[in-house]
Image (cartoon, rainbow, N blue to C red):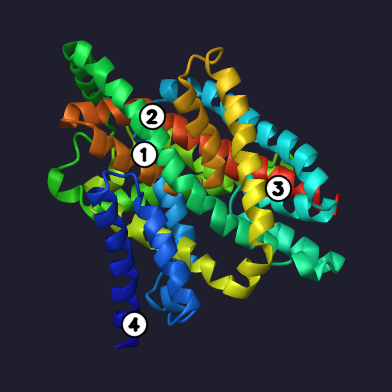
Amino acid sequence: MQYIIAFLVVMLFLMLGEWVSSLTHTYIPSVFLTAALFVIGYWTILPKDIVATASFNTNFSTICVGLLLVHLGTLMSLKELLQQWRAVCIALLGVCGTLILTLTIGTAIFNWHTVVAAIPPLTGGLVSALLMTDGLKAQGIQYLVALPVSMFVLHSLFGYPLISWLLKKEGGRLVTEYQKHPVKEQATNTASTTSVQDKSLFQKLPAKYQTSAFILAKVALIALLSNGFSFLLKNYAHIDLNSNVVCLIFGVLAHQFGFLESDVLNKAGVFNWLMYGLMAYIFAQLSITTPQQMGTIIGQILVLIVLGLLGMLIASSLLAKPFKMTWQMAYACSLTSLCGFPADYIITKEVSHEVAGSKNEEAYLIDHMMPKMLVGGFATVSVASIIIASIFLKLL
């Protein structure tokens, strides 16, 4: 019975996040409220292993990430992926803005170790937070051990509503743009869909064999090939290309050549299940923080977050026009470093659904915002933050 209870609690937290997001018109994103509920729960009555008890453990999350990233690759074309170099540049330069402001003003306010320990999780995800935590333990800097993970928790709570607000502004602009030329865009989308369907490698396979298991087997094969390719690059060519990035690229290629259908996991009927499981696993990482840890370092964290956000804003605003983006879209791309996948996907999806007045408008918003957010998130969280953490470990 305990497994069912654990599963029920996890689903209730996710459900409440979605309901509040809908009631507030995404001004409070679902991931923000769900994260807050988990933090409060862990600090009060929730068992630390409730997510694992609900079956969303490490093995489940590892499978989820590969399958979901391949799926996301089927939502964009190779041309769209290559066109996102601007989003990569904006995201990385936004992180540079954070580094400049925190390393100058931040070190004038706090000691060197505090700033160095806080910056990697401020500019990235959980992995960089855990790397810095291990580094502080190894260096014997025990009084700052709680800082990296606490920064990871709090900057996410700041980042989610801010990204949501920026995307709503960008979404409103895109809806106005779409309404001026709706026929042209609908024709473009239809032509693109037909092109992909015409190239399907399995057109002649009878429909009775194209089951959910068949679709999942194809997605799993692409995820396996992606991880194998990343392993070979790292061990034989000495190129450390993150396997998550490879999954996305291979998903795009598999879709482009007709091996995978568009929106493949929804066709298999498992997308929401995998996404909920991955989100639950991520929220489980909040269990390692305590109110006492937060209380001792909350002031330092808040000041550094403000400096980091201001640095990103300045860099994004200056670079938006040269990179042909609005400042809102440019800033949102930079802020993906505060959440990464899958939060960047969920927030973009929620905002697109809320702002759009029709299915065609929603598709238009997703086509224009989702690739930028996903690629920006991979550039910061999956690549830049790991590099920054590796460098800053040597500076402790």
Q: Which residue is mark 3?
A: 119
Q: Residues within 10 Å of mark 1 (few under 14, many from 20)?
A: many
Label 2 secondary element: helix
Alpha carbon of mark 2 to alpha carbon of mark 3: how far?
Answer: 27 Å
Quarter of the picture containing the N terminus is bottom left
Query: Measured from the top left, where is residue 223 in percent x and y?
Result: 46, 48
Label 1 secondary element: helix
Q: Which residue is mark 1?
A: 348
Q: Residue at x 67, y 37 (%)?
A: 98
Label 3 secondary element: helix
Q: Nearer the viewer, residue 304 or 226?
A: 304
Between circles 2 and 3, the one closer to the viewer is 3
Q: Amino acid at mark 3?
A: Ile
- Circles 2 and 1 in contact, beta carbons < 8 Å: yes
Q: Residues within 10 Å of mark 2 (few under 14, many from 20)?
A: many
- Among numbered discs 4 and 2, the one appearing first in the sequence: 4
